[in-house]
Amino acid sequence: MTMDPAHGTIGGNDTDQRDAQTNDFAEMGGNSQPHQEPRRVNNDPRAKQQKGNQVRRDRRDVHGWVVLDKPIGMTSTQAVAVLKRLFNAKRAGHAGTLDPLASGGLPIALGEATKTVPFVMDGRKRYRFTVCWGEERDTDDIEGRVTATSEQRPSREAILALLPRFTGVIEQIPPRYSAIKVQGERAYDLARDGEIVELAPRPVEIHHLTLVDQPDNDRAVFEAECGKGTYVRALARDMGRILGTYGHICALRRTLVGPFGENDMIPLDQLEALCDRAASGEGSLADALLPVETALDDIPALAVTRADAARLHRGQAVLLRGRDAPTCSGTVYVTVAGRLLALAEVGNGEIIPKRVFNLTGLTASPGRNERN
């Protein structure tokens, strides 16, 4: 079981960031021909326009997070496209790819929330995964070709004794089928072409690793909480080898991504039902959104006056004055009258805006600021 379309990492990696950045930008649309008549805008968010044989809807500004409980069989890119269509949103991107064979939390940023994607991707991830013993596969998951087999099966005592070796900062060799670049080429592309890919070990951090269940001799269920860049497939592979057998991932579910846990997840069918109710005037898609600042839970908040907010909104620095001036330093998110304004750096006696937010459009319902 893998973590990106080409068997990537548990945490964020260069493929994840590339995907998030690709989805981050608004669609350009239109064309560059001179004297083109401006397109007439219909303010109905579900209105449709006919252009040739294609049906088109006007995009709108939607800002916030939706934590999709991604079903098995859907790619992360497909999930972003579905959410973008349901909300009719101008911009969307995800915060960490989840493989089609995996289920669970896929945080999708809409509109201005795309500016906060890196803060989610750098957070911890938690997974529940099942290792099938007795087979090693070239992809280290159930999709791959069997490369080695063993009749040996580990005991519960042997598994428990092994877990401390895979906790903390460890050296891990990424899977051959991963998005890591080797001389400019993705490792998975080289592996698919039949080339022998030798990847160097790299340090990763596993905060917790526990044995949850052992339903039979062939399977063991684990839960891992990991830092960015950890490969769960490599974890299963390495445990199997040390235990005197082989192993690969045969089931995987992500239960935590940064600040987003299972209580924040919404299944796709519920989201589609909410969309249908909203279209008939019986609800609002805002109820499915979490506020943009939810991604910034670990960052201090700094409230400013409206006058200072006006300067920051123009990209100008604000001096910290008086005895009530904040003493914090580093990255903060700035609010005015309880509303998110900007990401900024505090230092040398001033607030320097780095990313300014424009939250005009559909945002989370007020009640969504209080999460379960």
Image (cartoon, grey):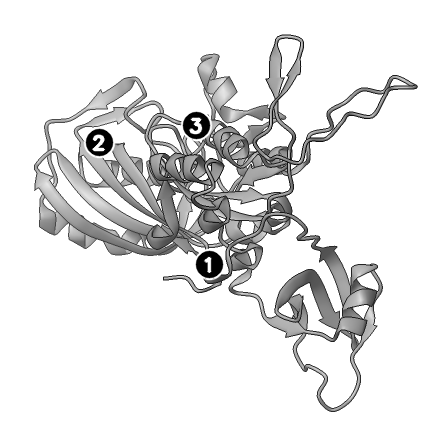
- Graded by Cα atoms within 10 Å as few (under 14), some (14 to 19) or many (20 or more), the crowding at tag 2 reads many
Residue at x 30%, y 17% (from the top left corner)? 145
- The residue mark sitting in front, 1 or 2, is 1
Q: Distance between the residues labelled 1 and 2?
A: 46 Å
| Helix, strand or loop status at disc 3 | loop
Q: Which label's residue is closer to the chain start, 3 or 1?
A: 3
Q: Which label's residue is closer to the chain start, 1 or 2?
A: 2
Q: How far apart are marks 3 and 1 (CA)?
A: 27 Å
* Apparent side of residue 28 relative to residue 173 in the rendered image (left or right): right
* Apparent side of residue 142 relative to residue 17 in the rendered image (left or right): left
Q: How far apart are marks 3 and 2 (CA)?
A: 28 Å
Q: Which label's residue is closer to the chain start, 3 or 2?
A: 3
Q: Is residue 346 or residue 227 the one in the foreground?
A: 346
Image location (x, y in percent) of residue 140: 32, 29
Residue at x 17%, y 28% (from the top left corner)? 134
Which of the labelled discs sits on residue 75, or is there none? 3
Q: Is residue 261 or residue 338 the one in the foreground?
A: 338
- The residue mark sitting in front, 3 or 2, is 3
Residue at x 16%, y 41% (from the top left corner)? 220
Quarter placement of the N terminus? top left
Residue 59 figure quarter: top right
Residue 336 figure quarter: bottom right
| Helix, strand or loop status at disc 1 | helix
Q: Name the residue under label 2.
A: 246
